[in-house]
Image (tube, rainbow, N blue to C red):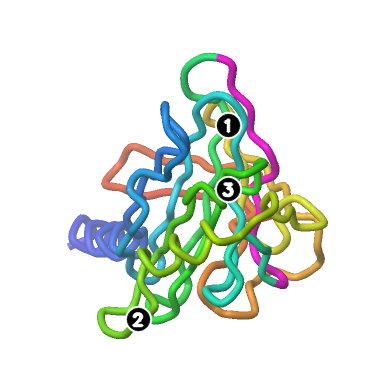
Amino acid sequence: MRFSTIFSASAIAGAALGADHLVVVGNGSLKFEPDTITAAEGDTVTFKFWPKNHSVAQGAFAKPCEPMDNGFWSGYIPSSQGAAADTYMIEVKNKSTPIWFYCTQGQHCAGGMVGVINQAATGNKTIDAYKNASTAFAKAGVEPKSAAGTGGMIMANGTSMSNSSSSGNSNKTGAASTIQVSGLTFAGFLGVFAYNLL
């Protein structure tokens, strides 16, 4: 009986963990791959950066290549060869709100380096429309004023560190939120895990 209680608790804890969606940033091209992600609430999206120097920032559909107030921004994550040691992760908090993002480096956004999480199934707010609007953006992508805003965390060589510089913990849109983790430990027994929040 005790085993089934532990097993049930472990199953619930495992179900609470969402899926992680990997997005490759600039691997030989000015693209996010994939540029369209479908994620459930509680899922995470991890951005993996390739040469030379890229970023990911949250924008609004109506203003491509410009940062959204209180949106996330990874800051620049450079790599001279292969994937950077650092990745950037956000958590999806509201699957019904699209999360638009772009690269702030130079003309990358104007070159179509944009993406979306949970694009609406109907209507004209599509990744193609966002790309078309971004290519009309004549100047360099606009950088947010501070790295991360209220957005995500940098993970370096398996160690996570928050790079949020604001006092808020969640995005005003409810679409993505800060994952501020100082230590993350997974125990091997039946999926039981422990974590320490900042």
Residue 61 in the figure: left or right of residue 15 = right
- Of labels 2 and 1, the one closer to you: 2
Number of numbered labels in the structure image? 3
**Where residue 31 sits: x, y (%)?**
43, 42
Mark drawn on residue 103: 3
Q: Quadrant of the C terminus?
A: bottom right
**Residue lying at 22% horizontally and 57% vertically, measured from the top left:** 7
Mark drawn on residue 186: none
SS for dot 3 = loop
User: Label 3 crowding class (10 Å Cα cut-off): few <14, some 14-19, many 20+?
Assistant: many
Q: Quadrant of the N terminus?
A: bottom left
Magenta-span inclusion, residue 78: yes
**Residue lying at 35% horizontally and 81% vertically, measured from the top left:** 124
User: Label 2 crowding class (10 Å Cα cut-off): few <14, some 14-19, many 20+?
Assistant: few
For badge 1, the amino acid type reads Asp
- Of labels 3 and 2, the one closer to you: 2
SS for dot 1 = strand
- Of labels 3 and 1, the one closer to you: 3
Comparing 122 with 160, the one in front is 122
Spatial CA span between label 3 and label 1: 16 Å
Spatial CA span between label 3 and label 2: 22 Å
Q: Please give the residue where the numbered disc 2 appears in the rendered image.
A: 124
**Where residue 166 sits: x, y (%)?**
81, 62
Q: Which residues are magenta?
A: 69-80
Q: Earlier in the sequence, mark 3 or mark 2?
A: 3
Mark drawn on residue 86: 1
For badge 2, the amino acid type reads Asn
Magenta-span inclusion, residue 19: no
Q: Main secondary structure of the magenta part?
A: loop
SS for dot 2 = loop
**Vertical position of residue 131 compared to residue 107: above or below:** below
Residue 22 in the figure: left or right of residue 111 = left
